[in-house]
Amino acid sequence: MLDRGTLLNSKLFVTYNEQTETLEIKWEGSVSSNEVRQGYSLIMEYVQRYKPVKWLLDFHNRDKIKRTDQRWVFKNFFPEALRIVSNDVFVAVILPIGSSHELVQELDGDELIQEDNFMIINHFLYREAAQRWLELDKSVKAGA
């Protein structure tokens, strides 16, 4: 079952697919700093409601966001989401070629760890490949 989802400013669509237990997030177009924060506030509502361990982020048609906004997502949103889910979180990100390096180049890694839980991020060019990766058995705890 798929919840009906939420659309924000026709640039962000968020839904939770109960059948695949996946939080699906799709951004499109140019996104301002204010829209980034509003969007992640909406996404946080889904994180609190469903506590999803599998996320599908489709940034394929979203323009680049400002570096300060990108840092805000990694320094504020991801650690809080990881704390709320209280489990490993697997994030499949669909990006155009060349964008994945820019997405993570400034991370020190601490943002993606909360107690014994990790946010594992993998980049893909196509939705199908991202979905296949999320469908893999994620029951083995990293490092166990």
Image (cartoon, rainbow, N blue to C red):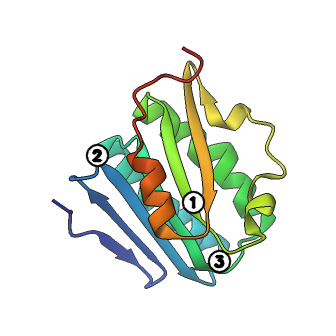
The outermost residue toward the right is: 106
Could you say whether the residue bearing mark 1 is in a helix, strand or loop?
A: strand
Q: Quadrant of residue 102?
A: bottom right
Viewer-nearest of discs 2 and 1: 1
Viewer-nearest of discs 3 and 2: 2
Instruction: Tell me the quarter of the image containing the C terminus.
Output: top right
* Residue at the image position 15 percent from the left and 59 percent from the top: 1
* Residue at the image position 43 percent from the left and 85 percent from the top: 10
Report the Cα–Cα distance between label 2 and label 1: 21 Å
- Amino acid type at circle 3 is Ser
Q: Measured along the vertical axis of the image, is residue 12 above or below residue 102?
A: below
Q: Do the CB atoms of the residues marked 2 and 1 lie less than 8 Å apart?
A: no
Residue 73: x and y, percent? 64, 53
- Amino acid type at circle 2 is Arg
Per the image, the residue denoted by label 2 is 49
Mark nearer the N terminus (3 vs 1): 3
* Residue at the image position 20 percent from the left and 63 percent from the top: 2
Q: Quadrant of residue 53?
A: top left
Which label sits on residue 93? 1
Which label sits on residue 57? none
* Residue at the image position 57 percent from the left and 48 percent from the top: 77
The outermost residue toward the left is: 1
Q: Position of 3 compared to 37: left or right?
A: left
Q: Measured along the vertical axis of the image, is residue 69 above or below residue 83?
A: below
Residue 126: x and y, percent? 54, 70
Of residues 37 and 86, the one drawn nearer to the viewer in this rendering? 86
Viewer-nearest of discs 3 and 1: 1
Is disc 2 surrounded by few (<14), some (14 to 19) or many (20+) residues within 10 Å? few
Residue 124: x and y, percent? 60, 62
Mark nearer the N terminus (3 vs 2): 3
Mark nearer the N terminus (2 vs 1): 2
Which label sits on residue 32? 3
